[in-house]
């Protein structure tokens, strides 16, 4: 339990930095120091996951911001604060470290197709209700195809993580969503974060090399 305590403290500490530390550059510096301390040792697979997630979700965020799906209050680059470019690598590496487990290698064609449709939906649908409907349908298909206990654990943990991130970010004024959704956050956040959790286990982890120093 003591060895896992730094991992369990990562999320509340990271969200406190985002919500209360002034200045995007200061937030980034504090976050990087926190993650370096709490993730050590950093393995090759960890670095690949982190960098790949940062690259992919920076592109997805830029497209979504162009669509007007959400907006940041103090952007620096590509419509987002500089620390946001580094956030998704943290989210995915955190979930991998917390849950771990056997890496699946079956049904690769289905997961690639489903993940492509998922990304396409978030890149092209601006209406919140339609986005929720389409991505919920895709997520249901994903759960029908992939429903091992660890699949559901990755999905569920990612939704809980997403709820913490989204509501802290909105209530602290870091970003906002159009249309005044209930609680400030549209319900498609559930399908976004849940889908990412499912695809992390089924698509991304099998692509990484085995954990080694």
Image (tube, grey):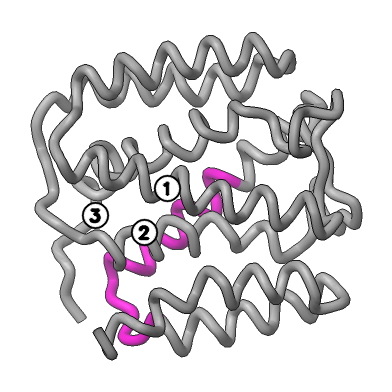
Mark 3 lies on residue: 208
Q: Residue at (9%, 31%) from the top-left corner?
A: 106
Comparing 166 with 110, the one in front is 166
Secondary element at tag 1: helix
Comparing 56 with 38, the one in front is 38
Side (left or right) of 104 relative to 43:
left
Query: In terms of sequence position, does the residue under pointer 1 or pointer 2 come before the other?
Result: 2
| Residue range of the region highlighted in magenta in the rendering | 39-57
x and y percentages locating residue 87 in the rendered image = 59, 60
Q: Residue furthest right?
A: 74
Query: In terms of sequence position, does the residue under pointer 3 or pointer 1 come before the other?
Result: 1
What crowding class fits label 2: few (fewer than 14 Cα within 10 Å), some (14-19), or many (20 or more)? some
Mark number, residue 158: 1
Q: Residue at (14%, 57%) from the top-left corner?
A: 101
Mark number, residue 21: none
Side (left or right) of 5 relative to 86:
left
Mark number, residue 95: 2
Q: Are marks 2 and 3 in contact (CB under 8 Å)?
A: no
**Does 40 lie within the magenta span?**
yes
x and y percentages locating residue 123 in the rendered image = 62, 23
- Which quarter shows the C terminus? bottom left
Comparing 169 with 93, the one in front is 169
């Amino acid at each position: 339990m003591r060895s896992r305590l730094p991992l369990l403290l990562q999320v509340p500490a990271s969200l406190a930095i985002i919500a209360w530390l002034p200045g995007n550059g200061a937030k980034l510096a504090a976050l990087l120091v926190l993650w370096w301390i709490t993730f050590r040792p950093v393995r090759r697979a960890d670095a690949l996951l982190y960098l790949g997630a940062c690259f992919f979700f920076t592109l997805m965020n830029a497209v979504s911001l162009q669509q007007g799906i959400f907006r940041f209050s103090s952007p620096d680059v590509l419509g987002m604060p500089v620390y946001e470019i580094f956030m998704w690598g943290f989210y995915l590496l955190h979930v991998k470290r917390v849950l771990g487990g056997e890496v699946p290698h079956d049904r690769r064609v289905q997961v690639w197709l489903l993940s492509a449709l998922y990304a396409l939906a978030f890149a092209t649908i601006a209406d919140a209700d339609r986005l929720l409907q389409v991505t919920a349908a895709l997520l249901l298909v994903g759960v029908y195809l992939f429903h091992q206990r660890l699949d559901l654990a990755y999905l569920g943990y990612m939704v809980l993580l997403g709820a913490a991130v989204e509501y802290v970010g909105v209530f602290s004024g870091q970003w906002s969503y159009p249309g005044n959704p209930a609680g400030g956050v549209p319900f498609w956040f559930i399908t976004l974060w849940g889908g990412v959790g499912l695809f992390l286990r089924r698509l991304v982890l099998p692509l990484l090399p085995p954990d080694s120093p």
